[in-house]
């Protein structure tokens, strides 16, 4: 299930908000309700009097000693609604009962009248009073009034401040994300989706424009292959057997994407259709040239190699419009360089002819072959292609030749990326 | 890839060195963007130090030439390297671009 950025962000914000709220509730729960002792000094004096009195009247070790101490402290405490701890000189808690035997860890006891800050201490159940007494040679000592409220107040204030800052920061981040980051992410995602949709459409168009099933004739063999880059380009190949004439075209529409694929499809289907109605190659080239020139909105140009092999006479008639040099019989075909299609609507195209014989192979390709580069940015080039073609076994099928060329280029490139579409068509006269 | 642009006697001299390929073409396109908007501009290009031009870059040059011509200007290539000349010959663009 795909979640939109806004929804994902809201879920995340809700989770973080819940966490902050939980932390707040937890800290409030853990902090103690401590009431202020308003008259610490008075209490201190009173308790010291009690302590002195106890010391002078009771022996340490007497069970009543502790009980008296506790009761007295409690009485003093009750009016102010605070609780207390009694501990012995080693720090072990005597009272209240639920704390009995626990060791009180206190780094320091802060006298209430001083301004020293509270240190962290483990004080459980006690709010503010600690009495410490010693046996027997030392008088009862009021260790001090330790106001746990301060401790927890500090900690509470600290926690509260921290949470407030966190909440403010969180709120600010929420606004920034909602108004800036999320819209930017949505724009990027929308562009990516649109690009993917366009790529899909372009691929479909390209699929339809290329010949998939090649003519099966005892006098010739044809095969072609296209290796596209990630982005759909404008390479074309098409062939059609009409009577005893094998028509073929290989071309390269400038530009990439859905628009190029559309123009490629237009050219390819125009050729396919016209050759069935006896169109001449020069006439076809003129028509396609007009098609592109008369639609300046396309802003596209195209190299094309149109050919027609008469399977009875084995004559190849061809018309080249700015396309790469065709390989024939181990060398380059004599091709008059004519203007690429889509520039000058008045350009006059002419055809050329060459006589073929049994065993001849024609290789037509796009510049993705010769302009493939290796890791050192060296081009594959025409010479390497010609030399490679001369090594192909005579019995090799056209399909195998095309695939072998793609493999050779891939090995030549090594780790260097493919920089253009590659289209190759091979025709063999049997 | 390096581009230099200067104006001399109402003629804009544009020289490009290095390679115009898929990576450098967008930079080239951005640099010549102001030229596309000029009316009746005469542009002369020195491509003697340009070693390679891709089909995409050719397309950009053709667009520039057409736009300049539509507004009464012109684009000609006064100097060109052998490798780029080969490409211009093959595509039949030599006659369009190169001044005799």
Image (cartoon, coloured by chain):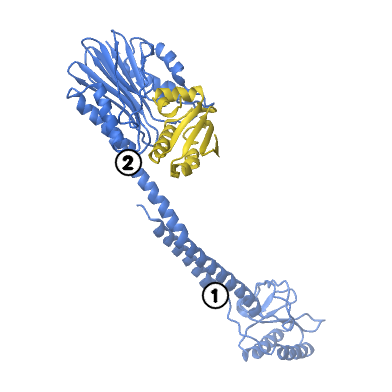
Kindly identify which residue carries mark 2: A297
Question: Quarter-wise, where is residue A137 in the image?
Answer: bottom right
Subunit of label 2 = A
Chain drawn yellow in the picture: B
Depth order, front residue of A158/B78: B78
Subunit of label 1 = A
Kindly identify which residue carries mark 1: A28
Report the quarter where the C terminus of chain A lies: top left
User: What separation in Å lies between label 1 and label 2 (alpha carbons)?
Assistant: 70 Å
A331 vs A228: above or below: above
The mark that comes first in sequence, 1 or 2, is 1
Residue A226 x, y percent position in the rendering: 34, 27
Q: Are marks 1 and 2 in contact (CB under 8 Å)?
A: no
Whether residue A152 is visible = yes
Depth order, front residue of A233/A123: A233
Question: Quarter-wise, where is residue A254 in the image?
Answer: top left
Q: What residue lies at 42% left-to-right and 15% top-to-bottom?
A: A386
Residue B48 x, y percent position in the rendering: 53, 27
């Amino acid at each position: 299930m795909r979640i939109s950025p806004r929804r994902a962000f809201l879920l995340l914000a809700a989770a973080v908000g819940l966490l902050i709220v939980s932390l707040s509730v937890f800290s409030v729960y853990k902090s103690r309700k401590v009431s202020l002792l308003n008259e610490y000094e008075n209490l201190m004096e009173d308790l010291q009097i009690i302590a002195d009195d106890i010391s002078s009247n009771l022996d340490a070790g007497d069970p009543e000693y502790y009980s008296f101490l506790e009761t007295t402290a409690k009485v003093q405490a009750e009016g102010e609604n605070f609780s207390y701890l009694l501990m012995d000189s080693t720090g072990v808690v005597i009272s209240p009962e639920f704390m009995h035997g626990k060791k009180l860890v206190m780094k320091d006891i802060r006298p209430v009248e001083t301004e020293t800050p509270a240190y962290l201490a483990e004080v459980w159940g006690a709010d503010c009073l600690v009495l410490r007494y010693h046996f027997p040679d030392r008088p009862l000592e009021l260790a001090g009034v330790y106001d746990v409220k301060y401790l927890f107040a500090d900690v509470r204030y600290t926690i509260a401040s921290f949470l407030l800052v966190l909440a403010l920061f969180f709120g600010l981040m929420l606004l920034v994300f909602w108004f800036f980051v999320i819209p930017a992410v949505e724009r990027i995602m929308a562009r990516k989706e649109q690009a993917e949709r366009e790529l899909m459409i372009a691929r479909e168009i390209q699929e339809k424009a290329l010949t998939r099933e090649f003519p099966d004739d005892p006098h010739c063999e044809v095969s072609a292959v296209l290796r596209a880059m990630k982005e759909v380009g404008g390479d074309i190949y098409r062939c059609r057997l009409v009577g005893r004439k094998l028509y073929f075209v290989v071309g390269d529409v400038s530009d990439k994407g859905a628009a190029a694929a559309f123009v490629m499809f237009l050219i390819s289907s125009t050729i396919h259709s016209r050759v069935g109605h006896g169109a001449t190659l020069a006439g076809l080239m003129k028509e396609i040239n007009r098609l592109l020139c008369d639609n300046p909105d396309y802003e596209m140009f195209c190299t094309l190699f149109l050919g027609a092999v008469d399977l009875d006479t084995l004559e190849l008639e061809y018309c080249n419009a700015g396309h790469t040099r065709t390989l024939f019989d181990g060398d380059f075909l004599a091709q008059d360089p004519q203007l690429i299609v889509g520039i000058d609507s008045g350009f006059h195209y002419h055809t050329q002819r060459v006589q073929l014989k049994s065993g001849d192979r024609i290789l037509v390709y796009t510049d993705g072959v010769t302009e493939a580069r290796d890791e050192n940015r060296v081009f594959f080039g025409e010479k390497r292609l010609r030399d490679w073609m001369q090594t192909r076994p005579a019995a090799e099928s056209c399909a195998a030749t095309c695939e072998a060329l793609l493999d050779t280029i891939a090995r030549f490139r090594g780790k260097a990326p493919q920089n253009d579409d590659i289209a190759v068509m091979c025709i063999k006269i049997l | 890839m390096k581009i230099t642009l200067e104006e001399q006697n109402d003629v804009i001299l544009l020289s490009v060195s290095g390679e115009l390929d898929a990576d450098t073409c967008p930079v080239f396109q951005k640099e010549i963007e102001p030229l596309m908007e000029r009316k009746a501009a005469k542009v002369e290009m020195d491509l003697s130090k340009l070693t390679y031009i891709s089909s995409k870059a050719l397309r950009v040059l053709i667009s520039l030439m057409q736009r300049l011509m539509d507004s009464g200007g012109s684009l000609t290539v006064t100097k060109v390297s052998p490798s780029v000349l080969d490409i211009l010959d093959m595509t039949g663009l030599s006659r369009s671009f190169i001044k005799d």
